Amino acid sequence: MRQGRRFAIALTVPVAVLAMPAIVAAQDHSANHRQYKAVDLGTFGGPQSYLNPASTYGSPNQINDRGTAVGGSDTSIPPTPTSNGFICFGPTGLVPFVNHAFERRNGVVTDLGTLAGPENCSVATSVNEGGRIAGTSENGVVDPILGVTEVRAVVWNHGQIQDLGTLGGNHSAACCSNDRGQVAGLALNSIPDPFAFFGAGTEVRAFRWQEGRMNDLGTLGGPDALATGVNQRGHVAGYSYTSYTPNPTTGLPTVDPFLWKDGTMTDLGTLGGTNGVSLGLNNRGQVFGFSNLAGDQVADPFLWDGEKLIDLYAETSGGNIWTADAIDDAGRVVGAADFSAAGGFSYAAALWKNGKAIDLGTPKDDCCSEAFAINSAGQIVGVVVSNAGEQRAVLWEEGSMVELNSKLPPGFPLRLAVAFAINERGEIGGSGLPAGCDDNDTCSHAFLLIPDGQDDDGDLEDSAVATPSAVADADPRPTTIRETPSAQKMVARIRDRMARRPQRPGSLSSQH
């Protein structure tokens, strides 16, 4: 059963629902599903724009419930010799242009700018219901230790950018935020650290920022920790070294996932192996992620239910969960699973709930599928991949699969490849391919689908039309990450994803 998934979390550089009926057929009952107003979010002059998947930064808030969407978009500005690959060059590091954070609000896409001018990079990772945006920006100062431009966790509020600072070191980055205005992420202090995450040179710490103050959340006993999610109660998930002593498997201290709340960091343990990492959490404080098993040859997805770790691969009926990509407040996890023992696909989109894996369906002539996000109504979005490697964005709802390209207005300029995000209003975001582009890694555009009859302010309108976004002038003032592979590479790499998961931003010292 585990053939093809013999991978583990190496960490030589630490990587950075309500009741729902079982879906028994992958069909598109078009008459039962709405149409959408579709928006190509375009770029700032470069080849690519993108939303970050929820599992990238632990935040499901790429689109808030008022319809504001945030992400990153390439400019036509070439990188400098010191451009920082931690946030520059798009989500895969393959695009040789400076990227800037964007927001789309009320029909207009705006360049949010950076801390130090247009030649620097920035990216927006989450937006709360008040419209405050969290992300990371270069600050124009070259780190004398690493030789690259420093990055800072930032928030944008009413168009103004704010540097959240560090814990005494040269870098920080924001993963996520909540509606209380709290921001979480990682920040460096000034203490030298030979084991530093991302090759940072000094200790890396998880932080929670609120009302102008950045608080070090501590560690599980070792030098480093970082945050991967913050919920509406202010609880923070992440992972941390547990000691200063290297273990024989990795040559680095052991890493465990944690949950921090009310000033206390709790070690969630592992599934028996050396390393475990969290990807995010819900508002009940349930945490999901991946952990090595005993022997460190295999990593399984896990759910911490508040009392114990559940191995989602081994302790699940109906199928074996391969990947965990998002969780909702009912404790439902979406991702992909092996349903071959039941006559299904070996890599198929799955919903996990109360110990059971539900096959969301994959068309019989296709290769595989994966679910990336879920809202409280049980709407799930993701991707289906053909045997030839072509990706198609899909929605699972009301017991069936909806091919989202079939719901587009005539003349829309993108083919929707992957859906990464869905909010409570049913608005969907992801990546699409314009004419002449067949590679999600280098030339895709972010898209937004707005349900028929709903405008950008949440009111009702009479019709749905193809809508190219207006683009505001760039503000000269004022990230790896899960990949979105190209169609040609998808079939070969979709299972190999286990070898690299969870994706996190690259080394702080990486350059283009």
Image (cartoon, helix red, strand yellow):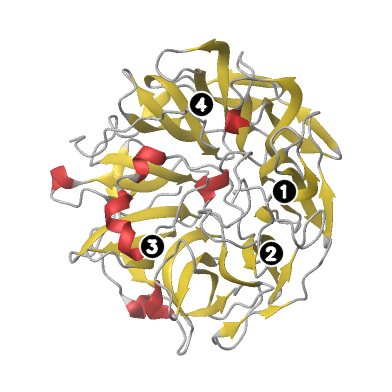
**Left or right placement of residue 186 versus residue 351 in this view:** right
In-front residue for pair 437/182: 437
Name the amino acid, label 1: Asp
- Whether residue 321 is visible: yes
Q: Earlier in the sequence, mark 4 or mark 3?
A: 4
Q: Position of residue 84 (x, y in %)?
A: 66, 47
Q: Which mark is residue 486?
A: 3
| Residue at x 51%, y 22% (from the top left corner) | 256
* Residue 43, x across and y down, in percent: 62, 72
Q: Residue at x 24, y 37 (%)?
A: 317
Residue 426 % position (x, y): 52, 65
Q: Which residue is mark 4?
A: 306
Q: Please, is residue 101 above or below residue 178 in the view?
A: below
Tell me which numbered mark, 1 or 4, is placed earlier along the sequence. Answer: 1
Q: Residues within 10 Å of mark 1 (few under 14, many from 20)?
A: some
Q: Secondary structure at mark 3?
A: loop
Q: Nearer the viewer, mark 3 or mark 1?
A: 3
The answer to which image quadrant residue 161 occupies is bottom right
Tell which tag, 2 or 3, sits nearer the viewer.
Answer: 3
The residue where tag 1 is placed is 179
Cα–Cα span, label 2 and label 3: 23 Å
Q: Of 283 and 348, which appears nearest the observer?
A: 348
Taking 265 as reference, is 21 above or below it?
below
Please state the total of marks drawn on the protein image: 4
Mark found first going from the N terminus, 2 or 4:
2
Say if mark 2 contacts mark 4, CB within 8 Å.
Answer: no
The residue carrying mark 2 is: 102
Amino acid under disc 3: Ser
